[in-house]
Image (tube, rainbow, N blue to C red):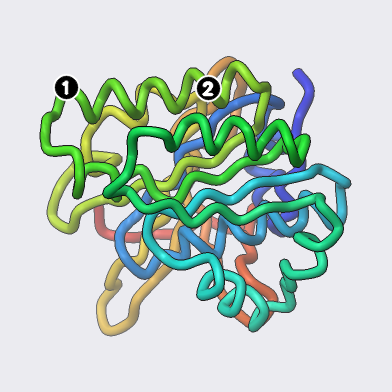
Amino acid sequence: MERVKTGVPGLDEIMMGGIPKSHQTLITGTSGTGKTMFCCQYIYNGVKKFNDNAVYLSFEEPADSIAENAKSFGWDFKPLEKSGKFSFIRYDPYHIEDVFDILESTIRQVKATRVVVDSVSALGLHIKDEAELRRMIFNLSVILRKLGCTSMLVSEILPGTNSLSRYGVEEFVTDSVVVLYYERLQSTFSRAIQIWKIRGSAHSQKLHPYKIDSNGITVYPKEEAFIKR
């Protein structure tokens, strides 16, 4: 099985070499776990280190804001955009009807093989019909699969729930699920990452600690984390 390196230190090791090529991976967790940072690191490393063109679709935060925050970790997306290897799409979910056409045309134009959709949770703020929302998430998955992109879809876990995602459908339409935790352990807060599933592949079954610093996210594959779940 061909793998795509994430470039996130330690992550590829617990995924047994990286994300299977053309897989869609759900990145999920509560607020403050670093989901957007995680995806920026995946995209930036993809273009800079592995020559994989990329597209980042944001339904929430403006592209300029994401790019500015990324610079604090040393990830400057502006030169990548100017080179034509990368494109940010800030899409207004109030006008959701043509999002798939815009995303598909941009992926084809950039010749992207890495894609981030941040986040599918935002769709539910503007599509109130549950059946329609599930259909839209499924159609998004179909398009990314058709184009052969190795993609990350961001969702969120609502505090106090046992669901892996906001709508309970995201984990079923994606091939892999990565869960980020930020939980209180006695008097301190602890970060942990878990590979919940990788379809058709083995992976670490343990919780591993990760840190966020000026270099971004680092996973510790040799260590085991302990959090209250």
Q: What residue is shown at x 33% (from left), y 60% (from top)? A: 227
Q: Which quadrant, please, contains the N terminus?
A: top right
User: Which residue in the structure is indicated by mark 2?
Assistant: 143
The earlier-in-sequence mark between 1 and 2 is: 1
The numbered mark at residue 131 is: 1
Residue 29 percent coordinates (x, y): 35, 54
Q: Is residue 17 visible?
A: no
Q: What residue is shown at x 27% (from left), y 49% (from top)? A: 94
Per the model, the C-alpha gap separating discs 1 and 2 is: 19 Å
Residue 136 percent coordinates (x, y): 32, 27
Q: Nearer the viewer, residue 44 or 131?
A: 131
- Disc 1 marks a residue whose amino acid type is Ala
Residue 194 percent coordinates (x, y): 46, 46
Q: What residue is shown at x 63% (from left), y 71% (from top)? A: 216
Q: Is residue 18 visible?
A: yes
Q: What residue is shown at x 35% (from left), y 43% (from top)? A: 120
Crowd rating for badge 1 (residues with CA inside 10 Å; few <14, some 14–19, many 20+)? few
Q: Nearer the viewer, residue 109 or 42?
A: 109
Crowd rating for badge 2 (residues with CA inside 10 Å; few <14, some 14–19, many 20+)? some
Residue 95 percent coordinates (x, y): 32, 44
Question: Is residue 85 depicted above or below 174 in this figure?
Answer: below
Left or right of 125: which side holds 42?
Answer: right
